[in-house]
Image: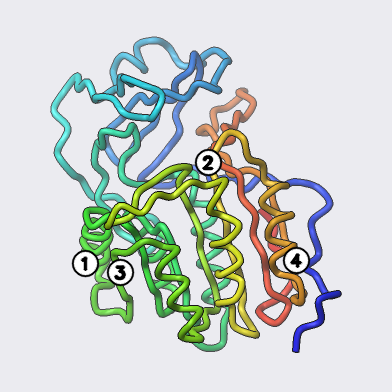
Amino acid sequence: MTDPLIRPALAPAPSVARSLGWADYALLDSGDGKKLERYGKYTVVRPEPQCWWSPRLDPEAWAGADAAFDPTDEDDSGRWRESRPVPDTWPLAWGEARLKARLTPFRHLAFFPEQAANWAFIDRRVRARAAPPRILNLFGYTGVASLVASAAGAVVTHVDASKKSVGWARENANLSGLDERPTRWICEDARRYVQREVKRGVKYDGIILDPPKYGRGPTGEVWRLFEDLPGLLKDCAALLSDDADFLILNAYAARISGLSLAHLMEDLLAGRGGSIDWGELALVEESVAERPTREIGLSFFARWTGAAGTGGPTPA
């Protein structure tokens, strides 16, 4: 029986979980409300309103990008303008995970590079377990976090409400040579799936939550972050095994903070020990001599690390 007086130790100050560039990705420059990035051999320009500062590279570097995204509204939709042909998809990699990048109508390229800090966290935690952990990835999108966990040895359940996204995730698994791993690919509303798992008494050793601000399930279910997150996180807490290792929560909504996510997590994990770190996920610009490093905070996060798992807070 859990002791309600036991609570996770909340980090007293926020941390920045930094995602540096890697072989297939780099944040080359930023400024004037945009960022210049390299995805494999292609460079793109995407809007980033919070980049109020001035770019550092010459205008020619920006003008030479293969594609630039022109937004049409405030919901991230718009169209890509190509200065030279860009293929429908092209392969990229992060560690053992392989994925197909593509120019989507929602300004991103079918994955979020700032999540690399979380992928590294997941990889470390899974590899540190003595036995293969069971990992649940909700709102799993194109599956990079699922593939990182799977490649590290986890048994993964990947859930997303979009049939297209689940299909992309399975393509990435095949590209990664992980299609024979014990992974379940489920197209369903995250809340409904989690509620059924609670009733079944199923347990997981790690849970990844990356919900949108607003979304719809496969049969018309409506997801609203501020209304629905507390209930979903409560059910996720019930799914954690006695020696669970981690619970990761991300949120991109502007009216939320890492501290609010951490306090919600602390409240719903009453009866458990461990620790919670919280703060921002940030992309770090490519390092150039004699140029101070700049970073773009893109998402808030809270991460619980279980006392019965590999233990202790994890540095960003």
- 98 sits to left or right of 156: left
Q: Secondary structure at mark 4?
A: strand
Report the amino acid beneath label 4.
Ser
- 293 sits to left or right of 24: right
Mark 3 or mark 4, which has the lower sequence index?
A: 3
Classed neighbour count for the residue bearing mark 3: other residues with Cα under 10 Å, few (<14), some (14–19), many (≥20): some
Between the residue at mark 2 and the residue at mark 3, the CA separation in whole angstroms equals 23 Å
Between the residue at mark 4 and the residue at mark 2, the CA separation in whole angstroms equals 22 Å
Mark 2 or mark 3, which has the lower sequence index?
A: 3
Classed neighbour count for the residue bearing mark 1: other residues with Cα under 10 Å, few (<14), some (14–19), many (≥20): some
Q: Secondary structure at mark 2?
A: loop
Displayed quadrant of residue 85: top left
Residue 275 bears which disc, if any? 4
Front residue of this view, candidates 30 and 10 = 10
Front residue of this view, candidates 203 and 183 = 203
Report the amino acid beneath label 3.
Ile
Q: Secondary structure at mark 1?
A: helix
Displayed quadrant of residue 156: bottom left
Q: How many marks?
A: 4
Whether tag 1 and tag 3 are in contact, CB under 8 A, the answer is: no
Between the residue at mark 1 and the residue at mark 4, the CA separation in whole angstroms equals 36 Å
Q: Nearer the viewer, mark 4 or mark 2?
A: 2
Q: Nearer the viewer, mark 3 or mark 4?
A: 3
Residue 174 bears which disc, if any? 1
Q: Nearer the viewer, mark 1 or mark 2?
A: 2
Residue 186 bears which disc, if any? 3
Q: Image point 76% across, 76% down: which residue?
A: 271
Q: Image point 66% across, 80% down: which residue?
A: 309
Residue 252 bears which disc, if any? 2
Residue 197: percent from left, percent from top: 45, 78
Mark 1 or mark 3, which has the lower sequence index?
A: 1
